[in-house]
Amino acid sequence: MLGISVTYSGTYKPTGSKHRARAAPDPPPLFDDTSGGYSSQPGGYPAPGADVAFNVNHLIGDPMANMAMTYGSSIASHGKDMVHKELHRFVSVNKLKYFFAVDTAYVAKKLGLLVFPYTHQNWEVQYSRDVPLPPRQDLNAPDLYIPNAR
């Protein structure tokens, strides 16, 4: 087209001209890089391939971070106490322990029962003094360890 070539750098240079356009210098960055972990490249970005690691020592020395960590841990312990209190109010942990009283032999037998249910003959729960035996002693006892399709 008319003998004019344009390069991608944004500078205009006509062909055959004796004058060359100078490249404009990079504008100064808007903000200084104060992060400490980044390289001093224009724009405040790390150099390609540079390791940008989180500096834990910087976080530990920060008083606001220490205050936030202390506040967060106090909230977590308060929440844990509330959950523990409310859980005991609705569900007895001792009653739950009955349903999880299993051992390795029980698990193997129960899985065999679930895979081959037609080989099992007696499906009644056994009792001792009007209390059902724990799952470890009775294969038919209800448990919360292995889901059952009864």
Image: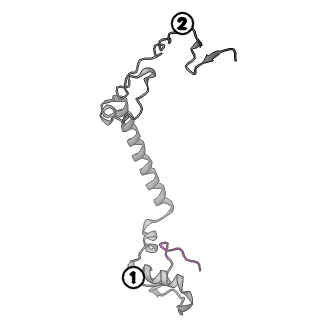
The quarter of the displayed image where residue 59 is located:
top left
Residues 57 and 146: in front is 57
The quadrant in which the C terminus is found is bottom right
| Residue ID for mark 2 | 18
Q: Magenta segment range?
A: 143-149
The quarter of the displayed image where residue 148 is located:
bottom right
Task: Please rate how many residues cluster around mark 2, counting C-alpha atoms within 10 Å: few if below 14, some from 14 to 19, many from 20.
Answer: few
- Under mark 1, the amino acid is Ala
53, above or below 1, in the image:
below
Mark number, residue 120: none
Residues 59 and 78: in front is 59
Mark number, residue 105: 1
Q: Which residue is drawn at 53% across and 74% down?
A: 147
- Under mark 2, the amino acid is Lys
73, above or below 88, in the image:
above
Give residue 95's position: percent from left, percent from top.
45, 70
Give residue 74's position: percent from left, percent from top.
39, 42
Secondary structure of residue under mark 2: loop
Tell me, yes or no, whether the highlighted magenta stretch contains residue 96: no
Tell me, yes or no, whether the highlighted magenta stretch contains residue 148: yes
Is 19 left, or right, of 98 in this rendering? right
Between discs 1 and 2, the one toward the N terminus: 2
The quadrant in which the N terminus is found is top right
Q: Which colour scheme is used?
A: one colour
Is 147 left, or right, of 76 in this rendering? right
- Which residue is outermost to the bottom? 121
Separation (CA) of disc 1 from disc 2: 93 Å
